[in-house]
Amino acid sequence: MANLTETFMQTLQTIEASGDPMPLVELFADETSLRNMTTQEWHGKEGAQDFWTRYLENFQTIRSEFFHHADDGHTGSMEWEATGQLGDGADIAYRGISVIEHDGQKVSAFRTYYDSAAFVKPAAQ
């Protein structure tokens, strides 16, 4: 039986392929928080939907591959590399780590840290 971290990873890959964030949003508790490299924080299921919709909107295609994960029954960590194409068609590849806090059934907190420099275009020469 998969733990919640493994379910989260599989579901993330599903929404990346389909473009529909709702299967992942359903893994979040009503009282949840989400953070990324920005200073913004999202709250609740509506916040989770907004977070994952915005994530998917950054890309024409994206696929996260996980190369290490752990789950102690309350906290899960996932190391990953994502590759794809940005909205303008430019290729992207970047690495990061995501952490979830959970009760075994629902995610109560999500944090992700990644190489944000991958999203910066070099200045024209």
Image (cartoon, helix red, strand yellow):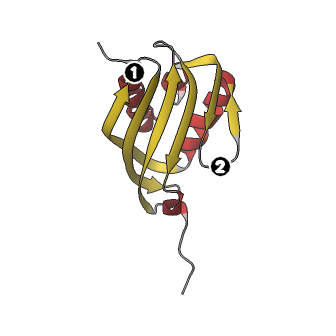
Q: Neighbour class for label 2 at 10 Å: few (<14), some, many (≥20)?
A: few
> Which residue position holds label 1?
72
| x and y, in percent, of residue 67 in the image | 29, 41
- At mark 2, the secondary structure is loop
Q: Nearer the viewer, residue 85 or 118?
A: 118
Residue 101 location, x and y as percent? 52, 24
Which amino acid type corresponds to the residue marked 2 in the rendered image?
Thr
Badge 1 amino acid: Asp
Look at the picture and state if 120 lies above or below 32. Answer: below
Name the residue located 40 percent from the left edge and 36 percent from the top edge.
78
Which residue, given by chain and number where applicable, does mark 2 sit on?
38
Q: CA distance from mark 2 to mark 1?
A: 27 Å
**Where, quadrant-wise, is the N terminus in this rendering?**
top left
- Left or right, 121 with respect to 80, comes to right
Marks counted in the figure total 2
- Disc 1 on helix, strand or loop? loop
Residue 81 locus on image (x, y percent): 37, 48
Q: Is residue 28 above or below residue 80?
A: above
Front residue of 40 and 61: 40
> Is 31 on the left or on the right of 6, as rendered?
right
Q: Quadrant of residue 97?
A: top left
Q: Is residue 19 visible?
A: no
Residue visible at 32% across and 17% down? 2
